[in-house]
């Protein structure tokens, strides 16, 4: 089984984890992307929403399991085939929530320009931290996609 270990700066990442955790807590009761079903499908929507919420909570829990004692002692997080997909989904849900809430006041073109330049000087302190979280989650997704294709089937199984 392929495993990728990534060394992160504890000083850079640890301060972001509190805000990311706060946003993840919001996602414990709210879907990152609301369902759009007609009122006629209310029962289906309720059941489906609860299943999606449970999956979203589990995915966020898997993401936070990366930031364990090993991370806080050595700055290392490890991705493997077992956690790649849940972590990708958690990062996506969290980024959507950041975009819809903490970064909602920033127009898309400004956000895209910030992503391209990585300069946050135009933002207030709160938006800077939210944007840093947004970009950190983006980088985690890129690492997983670069080194672990979660959709690929390993032939040695």
Image (spheres, rainbow, N blue to C red):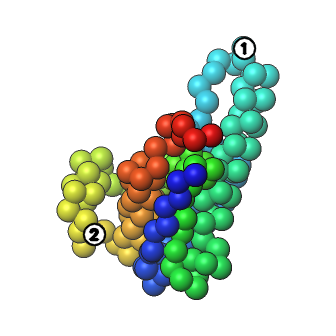
In screen coordinates, is 123 left or right of 33?
Answer: left
Residue at the (46%, 68%) spot, across then down: 6
Task: Indicate which disc, 1 or 2, sits on the residue closer to the N terminus.
Answer: 1
Calculate the distance from the C-alpha at mark 1 to the C-alpha at mark 2.
Answer: 46 Å
Residue pointed to by mark 1 = 40
Q: Nearer the viewer, mark 1 or mark 2?
A: 2
Number of numbered markers: 2
Residue lying furthest front in this view?
156
Which image quadrant: the C terminus? top right
Q: Residue 78: name its quadrant.
A: bottom right
Residue at the (24%, 73%) spot, across then down: 121
Residue at the (58%, 85%) spot, across then down: 73
Query: Which label belongs to residue 93?
Result: none
Tell me where residue 12 appears, x and y as whole percent.
43, 79
Circle 2 SS class: loop
Bin the neighbour count of mark 2 within 10 Å (Cα to Cα): few under 14, some 14-19, many 20 and up: some
Q: Residue 110: name its quadrant.
A: bottom left
Residue pointed to by mark 2 = 120
Tag 1 near tag 2, CB within 8 Å: no
Q: Is residue 100 visible?
A: no
In screen coordinates, is 14 left or right of 40?
Answer: left
Tell me where residue 38 appears, x and y as whole percent.
65, 18
């Amino acid at each position: 089984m392929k495993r990728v270990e990534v060394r992160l700066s504890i000083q850079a990442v640890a301060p972001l984890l509190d805000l990311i955790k706060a946003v993840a807590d919001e996602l414990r009761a709210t879907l990152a992307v609301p369902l759009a079903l007609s009122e006629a499908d209310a029962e289906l929507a309720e059941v489906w929403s609860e299943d999606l919420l449970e999956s979203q909570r589990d995915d966020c829990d898997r993401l936070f399991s990366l930031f364990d004692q090993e991370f806080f002692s050595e700055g290392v997080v490890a991705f493997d085939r077992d956690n790649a997909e849940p972590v990708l989904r958690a990062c996506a849900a969290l980024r959507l929530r950041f975009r819809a809430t903490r970064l909602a006041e920033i127009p898309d073109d400004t956000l895209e320009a910030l992503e391209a330049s990585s300069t946050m000087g135009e933002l207030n302190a709160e938006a800077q931290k939210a944007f840093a979280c947004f970009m950190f989650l983006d980088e985690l997704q890129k690492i997983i996609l670069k080194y672990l294709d979660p959709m690929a089937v390993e032939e040695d199984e």
